Image (spheres, grey):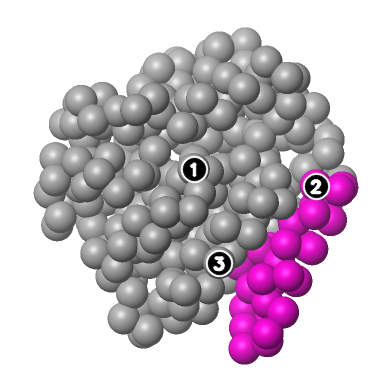
Amino acid sequence: MPNRLDQKFQTLKASRQKAFIVYLTAGDPNLKTTAELVLALDKAGVDVIELGIPFSDPLADGSIIQAASQRALKRGVTLSKVFELVQTIRRHSQIPLAFMTYYNPIFNYGEEAFVKKCRTVGVDGIITPDLPPEEARTLRRAAVKHGIATVFFISPTTTDARLRANAQASTGFVYYVAITGVTGTKSADIQDVLKHIRRAKRLTSKPVCAGFGISTPQQVKHISKMADGVIVGSAIVQKIHDHTGQANLVDQVVRYVRQLRGK
């Protein structure tokens, strides 16, 4: 089966549209709600979902996503249960799904086995903040074999040479980190982001999507003019937490996402 991420970006490009990507911590507040959120966000027009695999030491994440990971872990969310979650989602939706995960869970599961399982359950991509491309050769080979995208990062401080290398290693899309620092700690400067994405797009023809520090409709609107996609994570994770325990949690999150998109 063709990779859903690739298909999505091809479709968006053909219609001159940009991707809106939502990050969710799998299992926060629980796995059932995560599945409901994915299905509702798919119906609301979200293009791609990043599913964060809860991890005890998420070094690229700020306090909001760290807390979400801890809540999920305390509820007993494991990698195996996240794979089951994806299987549940796939019974109802073909929205592209990418795992955001640190390398430790992949290493413990086994790289080949992890990628093969991703293919089996319906995961389309793997994003690993703590695994640079040169250390990911065996994972990348397994991903190519099983048709799974591998997404690597570039940032405001990435040199041209490094940008080219990371972009070349990326499939699916290239992840531009819009701030220096971890998620959810400061707001991205629109003009600075546009400048760096413009540079990135001169150096690669692959889709470039911006994340980290994006949390307002204005940022989404303006950054989408240059980037191929915009990723919102911490702001949505916080919104989920704010409404945990309320019957209208999913509706509130969908309403917030529509506001971010200006729809």
For the view shown, which residue lies furthest in the bottom direction?
A: 245
Which residue has dot 1 on it?
Answer: 94
Image location of residue 110, percent across then percent down: 12, 49
Q: What amino acid is labelled 3 in the image?
A: Glu
The CA span between labels 1 and 2 is 21 Å
Q: Classify mark 3: residues with Cα within 10 Å, few (<14), some (14-19) or many (20+).
A: few
In this picture, is 214 found above or below 196?
A: below
Identify the mark nearer the N-term, 1 or 2. Answer: 1
Dots 1 and 2: beta carbons under 8 Å?
no
Q: Residue 131 or 27: which is nearer the viewer?
A: 27
Please report the bounds of the magenta region as a residue range. 235-263
Inspect the magenta stretch and tell me whether residue 242 lies in it.
yes
The CA span between labels 1 and 3 is 14 Å
Q: What amino acid is labelled 2 in the image?
A: Arg
In this picture, is 109 found above or below 118?
A: below
Which residue has dot 3 on it?
Answer: 36
Q: Nearer the viewer, mark 2 or mark 3?
A: 3
Q: Residue at x 27, y 40 (%)?
A: 119
The label shown at residue 261 is 2
Identify the mark nearer the N-term, 1 or 3. Answer: 3
Q: What amino acid is labelled 1 in the image?
A: Gln
Q: Residue at x 72, y 34 (%)?
A: 193
* Residue 124 in which image quadrant: top left
Magenta segment's dominant SS is: helix
Image location of residue 220, percent across then percent down: 78, 43
